[in-house]
Image (cartoon, coloured by chain):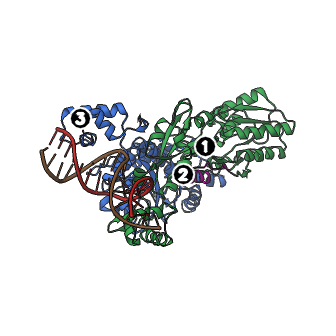
Chain colours: A blue, B green, C red, D brown
Amino acid sequence: MEVSTVDGHAATIYDVARRAGVSKSTASRVLTGQRRVSRDAVEQVKRAALELGYVRNPAALSMSTSNGTRVVIGVVSPRGKLVVDEYLARVVTTAARVCAAERIGVGLEPIALNDPNPFDALAHDPTVHGILLVNTAESVLDAVDDLLVGRVVSIGVGSSRVPAVDVDNYLGARAIIGRLFESGRSRVAMITGPAWMPCVNRMTKAYLELMSATGSPNRNVVGGFTAESGKLATNAILRQWPDVDAIFAVCDTTAIGVIDALRARHIDVPADVAVAGFDDTELAHYAGLTTATHPVEAIAEAATRAVLDVRATRLPDLYFPSQLVTRRTA
Amino acid sequence: MEVSTVDGHAATIYDVARRAGVSKSTASRVLTGQRRVSRDAVEQVKRAALELGYVRNPAALSMSTSNGTRVVIGVVSPRGKLVVDEYLARVVTTAARVCAAERIGVGLEPIALNDPNPFDALAHDPTVHGILLVNTAESVLDAVDDLLVGRVVSIGVGSSRVPAVDVDNYLGARAIIGRLFESGRSRVAMITGPAWMPCVNRMTKAYLELMSATGSPNRNVVGGFTAESGKLATNAILRQWPDVDAIFAVCDTTAIGVIDALRARHIDVPADVAVAGFDDTELAHYAGLTTATHPVEAIAEAATRAVLDVRATRLPDLYFPSQLVTRRTA
DNA sequence: CTGAAAGCGCTTACAG
DNA sequence: CTGAAAGCGCTTACAG
């Protein structure tokens, strides 16, 4: 943040106007990028603003327009219980950093999956500049208030009214499964996410397509995003398909649980069963886990910027590429 | 957040005043907790506010008082480069959750250790409600602007003007080192933090005291908070004191590096050298690392609440207890 | 194209 | 103890 001070206080639009030799109104018009202003005024005001290190006071803006002073990160979960994992923490931290430059704050609000009207309060809250949806699902997207359209962006799945910003986990999953095939595996099981969480559906799609294309059997089970769920899923997989030779989990933490369960049964990784995760977390690094990158910071930054500059038209969806990271487990 | 709506908009103080049958002024006096108001008015206004689910609009508050709309998390580092680790992410996430209930946002600002005037802009920024200092050092604390006193809280070391909220890592370190002694170790080396980061000084103090009390040799080296620094420090320790039988690192990540370095030299953990960390991160869990808890969420919540309700008097320092967690490495 | 004026929600001297 | 009025920084009809 670069807020210079004029006479002990942060520069206001009045300071800018005076220095530029115009009225507050004209200064405001220039600063909001309106059409009907003379070239001269534009130039003077812009220069004055730059010299004074002027940054709009969002509180004042908020009073005169519908603009809010904070970006709310709405975290969807089955019962509205806020679980802070590394992923969410990285999203929040990035958003807080990006918003700070515009003197906008961020807030964290749980959203219950079964809440019929999750945006009731947020839509009418004048402090809310926009909403960043995390872990969202279709029912929540459908409930997005008309007042909110153009100010809400989803990190994950989107809808006709809400643009999506996410990792391209479809191609990421293809790369990982391709790697498993290349290393000689053919009986690949997949552990997906919880049924209500559609952001990993594209990974399942990639899996099903590749299995179908290679004439391999479909073996997918539902998991959570915890190591514990990875253990449970592994046990289920081994019970149903004892000849499995690779397990692909949609997140690294789950994959760690897979490895634990396998080792507990003296099944060697990767000799007997190869294991791959997704996300490339620090944990994967230490566990030597083969995975694919998930550029969370880049995604969160893009999504935050999209929420920050409100526009009438829905932004196009944005998918960031995922890179295969080959380590010891596959 | 529980903002009800009146006629399609969030309730304002005007709605509350009307419902209570008083003027805005009186309503405001009640809501700000001022003295000179009749019992009757207090009761009516409070009831009206409750019924309407009234929550102050921080943007409007910000306009009429010096109150800001966001809590800035100031992260100190040698060159002002913002490194987001798990610890910081947990602090930011907790702050964002706590602030959301008061419709205040949070922001993230890097602060350079060598900046002679790190609070110049923040002190005069009307959007800044208060500051949460992370990883701070004495020089930064000394630079805290008069305008900021009472609105800044440090997670880590404090000063005469800035209250500290932190883990009681002095007792935590004592517990860990005690455990090392109990398990028969006597030549304990310690890896401290970077010299500029004083929040772990109390751990070093505990170490030096215990070494002195038991007539053990002092063996401490400077480290960073990375696994890589743990490796380097381990090599330095082994070079200087080949007979070392335990290594205590001030953070888990460093301890992981210690274990790696030890294993690379075929030194068994814990048979040959016991290893302990601090923080009890997820990584420690998976590595079977003996460590002590660091209740980051509780600390961050307390610190955030302290920043949120501005008061004239400096709060007392607050130290949260740390619990020993014994696992395989010590 | 430009300036004076009104208004956003709130608090706080200022008179009563 | 209470209400009317001013003011915080900004934008946007409203007149020119």
Q: Is residue B125 magenta?
A: no
Q: Which mark is residue B162?
A: 1
In the rendered image of this protein, does residue A123 appear above or below residue B78? below
At x 41% / y 69%, what residue is drawn? Answer: B52
Q: Position of residue B316 (x, y in %)?
A: 66, 50
Q: Measure how far apart labels 3 and 2 are at the Cα level.
A: 41 Å
* SS of the residue under disc 2: loop
Q: Which residue is mark 2?
A: B310
Q: Are marks 1 and 2 on the same chain?
A: yes
Dot 3 amino acid type: Val
Q: Mark 1, residues whose alpha carbon is within 10 Å: few (<14), some, or many (≥20)?
A: many
- Residues drawn in magenta: B298-319
Image check: B162 left or right of B122? Answer: right
Tell me which corner region of the image, top left, top right, bottom left or bottom right, holds residue A31: top left
Q: Which residue is mark 3?
A: A42
At x 37% / y 34%, what residue is drawn? Answer: A53
Q: Position of residue B191 (x, y in %)?
A: 71, 35
